[in-house]
Image (cartoon, rainbow, N blue to C red):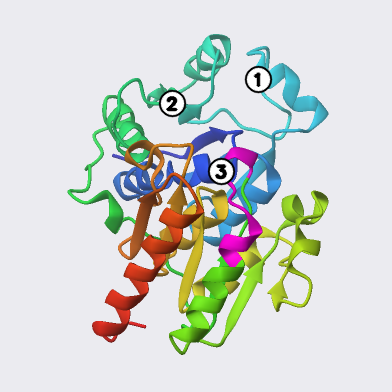
Amino acid sequence: MSAKNILICHRGALGDFILTWPALSSLRELLSDASFTGVGRPELMRLAVKMGLLGSFHDAERADMLPFFEGVRLPFDMPPPAGAVLWLRNVDRLASLLSSAATLPVAVIPPLPAQRIHAAVHHLRALASCYPITIPLDVNSCCRRLNVERGSDVLIHPGSGGASKIFAPTLYLEIRRMLREFGVHRVKFVFGPAEIERGLTRLYDGEESIRPPDLCELAEHLSRARLYIGNDSGVSHLAGMLGVPTVAFFRSTDPAIWGVLGPKACNYRVAGEDEALDAIKGYLKEQIERGAL
């Protein structure tokens, strides 16, 4: 099967976007001679280009993109695609516009699964109903590694896009102390624009930290990490997808649906800080006994 260009539309958050990557990777394998163009948030699209998932992209927030999303016309710099995948809501008119010139399917995939299955499996199955992709036996194997050497830093990300997903700062500071008790001294906190804007960083004054200016640099830092610890957040999803040993805590969301993917990812559903501490203590003991930390 061949195609000239496949349009990939996604306007959601980082974590939601990363959970589409197994499906997108499977489509790239199927259409190996096609080019892939994204439409979405620029910072996410640049990351997808860096990870080899897209070749180029259009900024979804451009003023001339409004008629596109309304299904009126294509932007002047967008040739009619041969096919498309739309991870969007209420796109009947847009799907009709794209289908009028397409030679391959225009797949409309609901952003949320209708049943209690992992979101990545939902995306794969929905895409497979339109394109004959191969669904991997283990969705956790679908990581996208960067060609960087693993370092010795443990990274802790105490933030998330949703306030209900975040624990008290005492949890993360206690984890840092616990790591040092286990002989792990290179511990750094990761702060992004959301944590800086909320003033979360002042709660960690005196702690060593990194503040990557964009997602591409964040991916570089994560790829070098010895271990990553965080919440249900886009940063955690990125760490797991990069193949980094990842521990993610879930308190208000269901990891059976939204769990971090990755061959070395562990998702813990916990009610509060005490359960999270017990979980990470058990994890660290096991890793040290195995010689993996």
Under circle 2, the secondary element is: loop
Q: Which mark is residue 112?
A: 2
Sequence-wise first label, 3 or 1: 1
Residue 33 in view in this figure: no
Of the two numbered discs 1 and 2 in the rendering, the one whose residue sits closer to the viewer: 2
Q: Which mark is residue 69?
A: 1
Residue 244 vs 7, above or below: the answer is: below
Residue 110 vs 16, above or below: the answer is: above
- The quadrant in which residue 201 appears is bottom right
Apparent side of residue 50 relative to residue 123 in the rendered image (left or right): right
Under circle 1, the secondary element is: helix
Q: Marks 2 and 3: in contact by CB < 8 Å?
A: no
**Residue at the (50%, 72%) spot, across then down:** 223
Q: Marks 1 and 3: in contact by CB < 8 Å?
A: no
Apparent side of residue 198 relative to residue 157 in the rendered image (left or right): right
Q: Is residue 163 magenta?
A: yes
Under circle 3, the secondary element is: helix
Residue 289 in view in this figure: yes
Apparent side of residue 40 relative to residue 117 in the rendered image (left or right): right
